[in-house]
Image (spheres, rainbow, N blue to C red):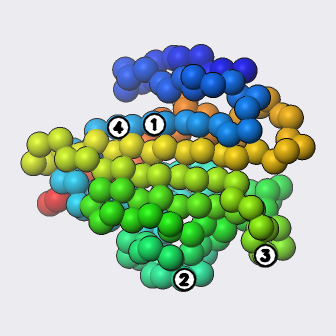
């Protein structure tokens, strides 16, 4: 089933996947303009400890490699605790272009031990839009297991839920980065 477009409070049309949700990979993209300079926005969104402030599925994060309160670097790792019914996700930064692009690959980690397959890929892109404005984009792919025939999307795959979280992200960054 393909997501149908709708318009959130921001007035922008939501992402509609051009491929069926029954395929082995699901895609979602959300973006928002944040009225702050690009580098401080990039640094803020790539700091592990900030995830629970805006991403509704990230209830708690545990840094395994890297610094909790600083932008995550290539090779840094984290456990993202989603909820009690879901095993934590083990993410590793696999691509980093400072100030521009950041990609993490994630594996399910039942019993805090990562399994042997990539199941999630998230990419953050920050693009300057003038001197004090940034277009922030979050792209997310989930790679389903062969035996997964579910049609229902997880919260992290739902454009409406994530767009609402980007609205929170915008408000939080604009409040926290006053002089940026």
Inter-mark Cα distance, 3 to 2: 15 Å
Q: Which mark is residue 113?
A: 3
Residue 81 seen from this side: no
Quadrant location of residue 11?
top left
Q: Are marks 1 and 4 in contact (CB under 8 Å)?
A: yes
Q: Residues within 10 Å of mark 2 (few under 14, many from 20)?
A: some
First reached walking from the N terminus: tag 4 or tag 3: 4
Could you say where residue 100 lies in the image, as x and y percent from the top left?
30, 56
Quadrant location of residue 77?
bottom right
Check the image and report above or below for 83 versus 153: below
Q: Residue furthest right?
A: 147
Q: Residues within 10 Å of mark 4 (few under 14, many from 20)?
A: some
Inter-mark Cα distance, 2 to 4: 29 Å
Residue at horizontal 48 percent and vertical 82 percent from the top = 66
Residue at horizontal 64 percent and vertical 53 percent from the top = 120
Q: Residues within 10 Å of mark 1 (few under 14, many from 20)?
A: many
- Residue for badge 4: 32
Could you say where residue 17 lies in the image, as x and y percent from the top left?
57, 26
Residue at horizontal 53 percent and vertical 17 percent from the top = 5
- Residue for badge 1: 30
Q: Is 6 on the left or on the right of 156, as rendered? A: left
- Does dot 3 land on a helix, a strand or a loop? loop
- Residue for badge 2: 65
- Does dot 1 land on a helix, a strand or a loop? strand
Q: Are marks 3 and 2 in contact (CB under 8 Å)?
A: no
- Does dot 4 land on a helix, a strand or a loop? strand
Q: Are marks 2 and 4 in contact (CB under 8 Å)?
A: no
Inter-mark Cα distance, 1 to 2: 28 Å
């Amino acid at each position: 089933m393909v997501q149908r477009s709708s318009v959130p409070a921001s007035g922008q049309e939501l992402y509609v996947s051009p491929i069926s949700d029954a395929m082995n990979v699901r895609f979602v993209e959300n973006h928002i303009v944040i009225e702050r300079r690009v580098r401080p926005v990039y640094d803020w969104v790539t700091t592990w400890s900030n995830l629970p402030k805006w991403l509704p599925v990230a209830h708690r994060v545990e840094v395994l490699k890297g610094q909790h309160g600083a932008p995550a670097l290539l090779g840094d790792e984290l456990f993202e605790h989603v909820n009690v019914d879901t095993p934590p996700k083990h993410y590793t930064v696999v691509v980093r272009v400072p100030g521009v692009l950041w990609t993490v690959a994630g594996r399910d980690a039942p019993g805090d031990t990562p399994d042997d397959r990539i199941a999630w890929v998230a990419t953050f892109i920050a693009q300057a839009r003038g001197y004090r404005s940034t277009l922030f984009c979050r792209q997310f792919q989930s790679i389903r297991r062969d035996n997964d025939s579910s049609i229902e999307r997880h919260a992290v795959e739902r454009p409406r839920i994530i767009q609402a979280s980007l609205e929170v992200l915008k408000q939080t960054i604009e409040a926290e980065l006053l002089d940026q």
